[in-house]
């Protein structure tokens, strides 16, 4: 357990580790490329360890130093001797399922008990439409999965339908492997696509590695050309989701924090948290290659649709607890299928600290009164890194906030606590 210390106005400048989403995408495109790629500034964490380990099981050579060197296999995925275990890494589970489907042998994709509750049925259905043999072992539409048990070979391609876009990871997964289908791949998506900026990020990384996808503006239709990714040197942006805790620290203490390595514009949709902090009263500026946030004397509540940036909802909710007036966060039902049921967890833990918060089916309402009446407490983190990191921000203003299960930050930000401590321990 960690107890956070309260502090006055924070003045800090920080370089955050590389983006989890970009690292995993670039790993996959580099692994499927022909030739040698170099990733500059990749994220070293539990989740990226799972992804790179899985790709190594599929025969890809990855040398990890400060940069990562990847020898691409040109799309020739090798058999894995053992099941591929991905913990609670939703991104890798969804993205690498399709990579395994490119292989000619059987694969088992598995994860931890929470991953056994996180759906993947819509992706399975779309892959079946491309001729892939894939089953959910327990018949739950969740992992573990068996792929290619009948000895079918690769992805046939043609047209398929993704029946639901509640996780953008289904769509990213299909797009990343589609160039390697035997016939040109076409993809139709039914229903609203949530977390859209992650799809844009996938398309951008594919383009950077030489594959240009044609699509409709609303992401309901895609045509993916056949081809092979081109190996290259690729620089990973700092992680915007993980920067959010530092920007939020500035917002709630009335100080200034500059994150030096999340650029404007960023490939990461979560960088759009910054304008939301601006709407709440913060001053936001582009500084060199980074973004600076200064907290105001008085934060104001806002109404916002966060369907496109689920991972920074806990951060905004914590800031809202220090604002004046009501903050309504809409369109966030997909928070319920993350590392934990994050919608419910955020409401429960903010309530534990004395905040007035309502949980609705797909939204939450925070009734802020400038942080008055908030008090300390032992925060449960539900093995969810974002719960731990976001609730720590409250402890900068409220005495006695203790974070239990703090090691869960290893998923995306192993040295988070060392860096966060620098905000309140001086010298
Ligand atoms: O593609 C990605 O890298 C991610 C997509 C998002 O998931 P959903 O699309 O399931 O909302 C996000 O929550 C996750 O942390 C990373
Ligand atoms: C939801 C997250 O990750 P994933 O879906 O990859 O487990 C996250 O990092 O907040």
Image (cartoon, rainbow, N blue to C red):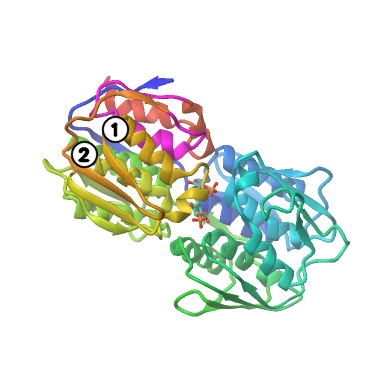
Q: Residue at x 49, y 80 (%)?
A: 216
Which corner quadrant of the image does residue 147 belong to?
bottom right
- Residue marked by disc 2: 322
- 227 with respect to 239 (left or right): right
x, y percentage for residue 310? Answer: 42, 53
Q: Is residue 82 above or below residue 379?
A: below
Q: Residue at x 73, y 51 (%)?
A: 60
Q: Is residue 382 magenta?
A: yes
Q: Tag 1 or tag 2, which sits nearer the N-term? A: 2
x, y percentage for residue 26? Answer: 57, 56
Q: Is residue 411 magenta?
A: no
Is there any visible trace of residue 181 in the rendered image? yes
Q: Which residues are magenta?
A: 380-404
- The CA span between labels 2 and 1 is 8 Å
x, y percentage for residue 119? Answer: 61, 54
- 399 with respect to 31 (left or right): left
In the image, 210 versus 122, the foreground residue is: 122
In the image, 294 versus 394, the foreground residue is: 394
Determine the secondary structure under disc 1. helix
Which of the image's four quarters has the C terminus?
top left
Mark 1 Cα within 10 Å, few/some/many (few <14, many 20+)? many
In the image, 31 versus 93, the foreground residue is: 93
Cβ–Cβ under 8 Å for marks 2 and 1: yes
- 103 with respect to 312 (left or right): right
- Residue marked by disc 1: 394
């Amino acid at each position: 357990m960690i107890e956070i210390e309260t502090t006055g106005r924070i003045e800090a400048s920080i370089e955050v580790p590389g983006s989890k989403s970009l690292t995993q995408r670039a790993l996959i495109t580099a692994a499927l490329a022909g030739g040698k790629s170099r990733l500059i500034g990749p994220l070293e964490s539990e989740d990226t360890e799972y992804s790179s380990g899985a790709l190594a099981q599929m025969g890809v050579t990855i040398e990890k130093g400060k940069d990562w060197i990847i020898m691409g296999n040109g799309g020739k995925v090798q058999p894995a001797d053992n099941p591929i275990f991905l913990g609670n890494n939703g991104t890798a589970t969804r993205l690498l399922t399709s990579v395994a489907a490119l292989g000619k042998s059987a694969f088992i994709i598995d994860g931890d008990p929470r991953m056994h509750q996180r759906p993947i049925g819509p992706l399975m259905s779309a892959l079946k439409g491309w001729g892939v043999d894939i089953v959910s072992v327990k018949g739950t539409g969740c992992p573990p999965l068996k792929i290619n048990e009948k000895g079918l070979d690769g992805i046939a391609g043609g047209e398929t339908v993704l029946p639901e876009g509640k996780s953008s990871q289904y769509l990213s997964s299909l797009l990343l492997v589609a160039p390697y289908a035997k016939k040109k791949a076409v993809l139709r998506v039914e229903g609203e696509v949530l977390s859209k900026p992650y799809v844009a990020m996938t398309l951008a990384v594919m383009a950077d590695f030489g594959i240009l996808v044609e699509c409709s503006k609303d992401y309901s239709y895609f045509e993916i050309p056949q081809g092979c990714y081109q190996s290259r040197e690729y620089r990973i942006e700092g992680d915007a989701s993980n920067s959010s805790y530092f920007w939020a620290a500035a917002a709630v203490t009335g100080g200034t924090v500059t994150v030096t390595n999340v650029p404007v514009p960023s490939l990461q949709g979560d960088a759009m948290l910054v304008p939301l902090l601006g709407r709440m009263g913060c001053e936001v500026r582009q500084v060199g290659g980074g973004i600076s946030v200064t907290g105001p004397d008085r934060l104001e509540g806002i109404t916002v649709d966060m369907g496109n940036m689920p991972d920074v909802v806990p951060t905004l909710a914590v800031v809202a607890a220090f604002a004046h007036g009501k903050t309504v966060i809409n369109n966030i039902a997909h928070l319920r299928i993350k590392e934990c049921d994050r919608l419910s967890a955020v409401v429960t833990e903010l309530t534990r600290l004395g905040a007035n918060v309502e949980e609705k089916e797909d939204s939450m309402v925070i009734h802020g009164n400038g942080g008055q009446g908030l008090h300390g407490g032992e925060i449960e983190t539900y093995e969810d890194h974002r719960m731990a990191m976001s609730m720590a921000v409250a402890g900068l203003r409220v005495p006695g906030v203790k974070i239990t299960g703090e090691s869960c930050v290893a998923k995306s930000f192993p040295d988070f606590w060392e860096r966060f401590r620098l905000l309140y321990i001086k010298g």
